[in-house]
Amino acid sequence: MERRAFVSNLGLTFALACTAGLAACSKGGGGSDTPPPTPGGGSAKLTLNLVSDLPNVGDFKIENGVIIIRTATGNTAASFSALSSTCTHQGCTVATFNNTSKLIECNAPCGHGSRYTTSGAVNTGPATAALAAYTIKVDGNSLTVS
């Protein structure tokens, strides 16, 4: 292969790889084109049985676009935090709640390291916008997020 053809092919391959990488980043790495639920909407986004779900302070669940965390004892709305599980930096789903640091972490699949408080505020960037909060209603042993 001629040097000129080799360099041309190498440049084209590099350009295609960059374009594919940018396209993947713009989709946020969440693997879904479905937008996250709208905070404050009227329909239930998640319903939990408090006898079996989230029995201990620090327990959390990520489901249906929501991260819900038990932040205190007792079965009252104030004992929980319900936030959008969609990272505001790249749109992927937050990975976990770290009970030691008390922070929501966005580690995977994005890998950028943003951290949020249980109120949704950004603790550590690169994210600059807070996670949206949802309404919590507790009725006996049933918790509903809407």
Image: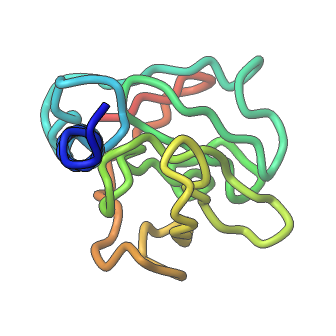
Looking at the image, residue 1 lies above or below residue 82: above
Q: Position of residue 111 (x, y in %)?
A: 56, 55
In the rendered image, the quadrant that contains the N terminus is top left
Q: Residue at x 36, y 34 (%)?
A: 30
Q: State the image quarter where residue 92 is shown.
A: top left
Q: Position of residue 96 (x, y in %)?
A: 66, 47
Q: Residue at x 62, y 23 (%)?
A: 141
Q: Residue at x 44, y 40 (%)?
A: 93
* Residue nearest the viewer, comparing 27 with 123: 27
* Residue nearest the viewer, comparing 26 with 42: 26
Q: Position of residue 23 (x, y in %)?
A: 19, 41
Q: Residue at x 62, y 33 (%)?
A: 61
Q: Please give the count of numbered marks on the rendered protein.
A: 0
Looking at the image, residue 34 lies above or below residue 135: above
* Residue nearest the viewer, comparing 130 with 82: 130
Q: Position of residue 45 (x, y in %)?
A: 32, 25
